[in-house]
Amino acid sequence: MDTTEDLGELYFSQGHASVNTHEFLDYVTMTYGERDHPAKKEWTFQEHFNFIQEDLEEMLFDLFTRYEIEYRNFNLDNYFMPELYWWQFRFKKEWRDRQFKTLTLEMIMESAKAGKWLYD
């Protein structure tokens, strides 16, 4: 099913079902955000979700599985600095100078339409 307009609400294909954009954003808000600040598709994970790496991985895994996104080619290290142990301090400089890509909710939504991760 292609993207369609229905009563002013945007739907996108997800596997064999349609998912409402508002439902997606509401799910993110209720599960991972602040209820007085509803999630928006242009939100970046770096700016709006201040999670430790483990929690961020759980959130992304939840979204990928809930919306049936094949994420085999997704690489978290392209978007966030990995957690390094104190004894790995020599690697911190390498990571500190690295340019990370921006990760947005819209990227998750677009990937849900395709059924696979589109950006790495």
Image: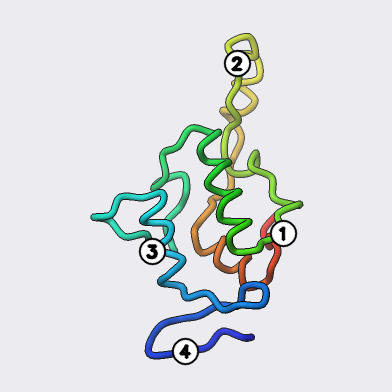
Amino acid at pointer 2: Tyr
Q: Quadrant of residue 7?
A: bottom left
Residue 89 image offset from top left, x and y in percent: 61, 13
Q: Which residue is mark 4?
A: 5
Say which of marks 4 and 2 sits in front. Answer: 4
Say which of marks 3 and 2 sits in front. Answer: 3
Q: Quadrant of the N terminus?
A: bottom right
Amino acid at pointer 3: Asp
Amino acid at pointer 4: Glu
Q: Which residue is mark 3?
A: 26
Q: Distance from label 4 to label 1 (Cα)?
A: 25 Å
Q: Residue at x 36, y 55 (%)?
A: 30
Say which of marks 4 and 3 sits in front. Answer: 3
Q: Residue at x 28, y 54 (%)?
A: 35
Q: Residue at x 51, y 37 (%)?
A: 55
Q: Earlier in the sequence, mark 3 or mark 1?
A: 3
Q: Earlier in the sequence, mark 3 or mark 2?
A: 3
Tell me if residue 9 comes above or below residue 115 in the rendering: below
Q: Which residue is mark 2?
A: 85
Residue 43 image offset from top left, x and y in percent: 42, 57
Q: Earlier in the sequence, mark 1 or mark 2?
A: 1
Q: Earlier in the sequence, mark 4 or mark 1?
A: 4
Q: Which residue is mark 1?
A: 70
Tell me if residue 95 comes above or below residue 15 in the rendering: above
- Find out whether the residues at labels 1 and 2 contact each other: C-beta distance under 8 Å: no
